[in-house]
Each structure stands twice: as structure tokens, then as C-alpha cells.
Amino acid sequence: MQFSPLIDQLVDALRCLPGVGPKTAQRMALHLLERDRPGAERLAETMLKAVEHVGHCEQCRNLSETPLCKLCESPQRDSSLLCIVEMPADVMAVEQTGSYRGHYFVLMGHLSPIEGVGPEQLGIGKLPARVSQGPVEEVIIATNPTVEGEATAHYIVEQLRGLPVRVSRIAHGVPLGGELEYVDGGTLVHAFSGRRSLG
């Protein structure tokens, strides 16, 4: 069904969101127009402000409204730890655990030659200088356990080789509460290869 041109444009614009197909976009558009026009205005204003004012932190490359993000500015963070993640959402996920107090370096993706994403786009060339200039003692690579994530991790290890820093990789394996019979083979291989001593 065709709506008015503006409604069609709104539906089409909402489809840029991940996981939003034509039907979901149509429901969102109609909800905003029929039941929550103040919410629609607030959404539009906030989105426009965010697009205009949110950039990247000069140090960690995370999303930030200021040249240095709050995490990089905080004196409470442990400067000896640097965690490398793929996306800003990964920073949020790690921060929500409350178990990591170091700094971050956000790649904004992973190596993907097919999509034209190389080391330059990910800022990997800045890593050796970032490690050398600060009191970084350990680099924790927390890229995703995908083929691209593993390739990115391997490339980063090669770039940091020879620097006086310990490089580690987050463990991948059986999830807490998971049962072995339901875990896929690749996850089990990672779990066995990343096992640690208990005694």
C-alpha cells in the first residue's frame, strides 16, 4: 500500500536501522504519527543534535561529544591496560560488566578486504605509538570470535611485536550455564585451547 510521499519517506528512513524491515518501519512510522507526535519531535531533534555534535575521541576513537571522551579523561582508569574492541557497542558491553577499569581503543570495524576495510580505516597504524607513548603494560584484544575478528587480532599482534608490552586475547568458550551437548564444535575447540590451570 502506498501512503503519502512524506509517510513513505519516513518509512524508508526508518529502514536504515538494523533489524528493521518494511513492516516494522511502517508500524514505527504510523505509531509516531498517530500516537506520539511529541515523541517523534523529540526523536528528530535529538537525532539531529547527535549527528551534528557526536564525533570520535582523539585518543580511543570511541563516540564522543568532546575531543577526549569521559573514559579517557577519567583519572580513575588504569592506564597500564588497553583493550582493543571493534565497535562502540563493545565498549558499552564491557563497561556494563563493571570488571574492567582500563582504557580502550575502538577500531570501528574489522579487517575486511572484500568491503575495502584495511588497517588504515581501522586506525591500526596508530596503535604502536599509542602503546609506546603511555604506560601501557598489557594490550587486551577483544575483537569478535569471527573469521574477520580473528584475522584482525592476528594482524594487531604482528603490529605490536617487538614492543615492550604483553598482548593477550579474551577467552572464548562455553558460556556460563551452558551445557556441552548444546555447544557448537568451534566454541568447544576455543574452550579447550584456552583452558587454564586450576592448581
Image (tube, grey):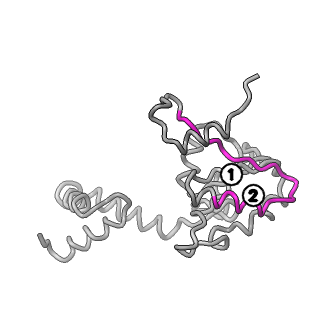
Residue 189 against residue 109 in the figure, above or below: above
69 relative position to 184: left or right: right
Q: Which residue is mark 2?
A: 157
The crowding category of the residue bearing disc 1, from other C-alpha atoms within 10 Å (few below 14, some 14 to 19, many at least 20), is many
The crowding category of the residue bearing disc 2, from other C-alpha atoms within 10 Å (few below 14, some 14 to 19, many at least 20), is some
Expressed as whole percent of the image width and height from the top left, the position of residue 156 reads: 72, 60
Q: Within the magenta stretch, is there residue 161?
A: yes
Q: Nearer the viewer, residue 103 or 149?
A: 149
Q: Which residue is mark 1?
A: 141
Q: Nearer the viewer, residue 72 or 135?
A: 135
- Rendered image quadrant of residue 163: bottom right
- Rendered image quadrant of residue 116: bottom right
* Residue at x 79% of width, y 60% of height: 160
What residue span does the magenta drawing correspond to? 151-175
Outermost residue, left direction? 1
Callouts 1 and 2 close, C-beta under 8 Å: yes
4 relative position to 118: left or right: left
Q: Is residue 181 visible in the rendered structure shown here?
A: yes
Q: Is residue 37 visible in the rendered structure shown here?
A: no
Q: CA distance from mark 1 to mark 2?
A: 9 Å
What element does badge 1 sit on?
strand
3 relative position to 187: left or right: left
Q: Within the magenta stretch, is there residue 22?
A: no
Q: Quadrant of the C terminus?
A: top right
